[in-house]
Amino acid sequence: MTSNDNPLDRILVLAGGLCGVFGVALSAAAAHRGGTFTATAASFLLMHAPLFVAVGLLGGNRLLRGGSFALLAGLVVFSGDLLARDVLGFRLFPFAAPTGGTLLMAGWLCIAASALARPRRNS
């Protein structure tokens, strides 16, 4: 799998696969029964799935992994809230979608910042 077989890397690959399968399933559901929120949640899941797989397989510095997990948390809260609205008729909790969206943006900023981090020297 990865060169160091880090358990966190396995979690990211698993998350990527699950985001992919749920993104496809929700896209189909939105196409057949409608649901703007469901379609948006599906798009977010599908657009983030490759990132989780890539970081999980290739590894990276702490900032890159931390940003990936911030994205994962934001994705669960944001998409979960959208799905709860469409399927259950209520929100997960007040300000769930904006909270999830903020986590998504913070995660992407961490990923961008990871490119500026100095590589660790192996001694």
Image (cartoon, helix red, strand yellow):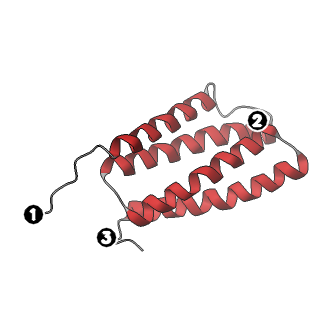
Q: Residues within 10 Å of mark 1 (few under 14, many from 20)?
A: few
Cα distance in 3D space between marks 2 and 1: 52 Å
The residue that disc 3 covers is 4
Q: Earlier in the sequence, mark 2 or mark 1?
A: 2
Q: Is residue 8 above or below residue 100?
A: below
Q: CA distance from mark 3 to mark 1?
A: 17 Å
Left or right: 98 in relation to 83: left
SS for callout 3: loop
**Residue 24 position (above or below residue 87):** below
Q: What's the mark number on residue 85?
A: 2
Residue type beneath disc 1:
Ser
* Disc 2 from disc 3: Cα separation: 41 Å
Position of the N terminus by quadrant: bottom left
What is the quadrant of residue 90 in the picture?
top right
For the point 87% across and 44% down, the residue is 34
Q: At x 47% / y 59%, what residue is drawn?
A: 12
Q: Which residue is mark 1?
A: 123
**Image position, residue 42 (x, y; %):** 71, 49
Asked which quadrant contains residue 97, the reply is top right
Sequence-first tag of 2 and 3: 3
Q: Secondary structure at mark 1?
A: loop
Task: Tell which of 98 and 61 is nearer to you.
Answer: 61
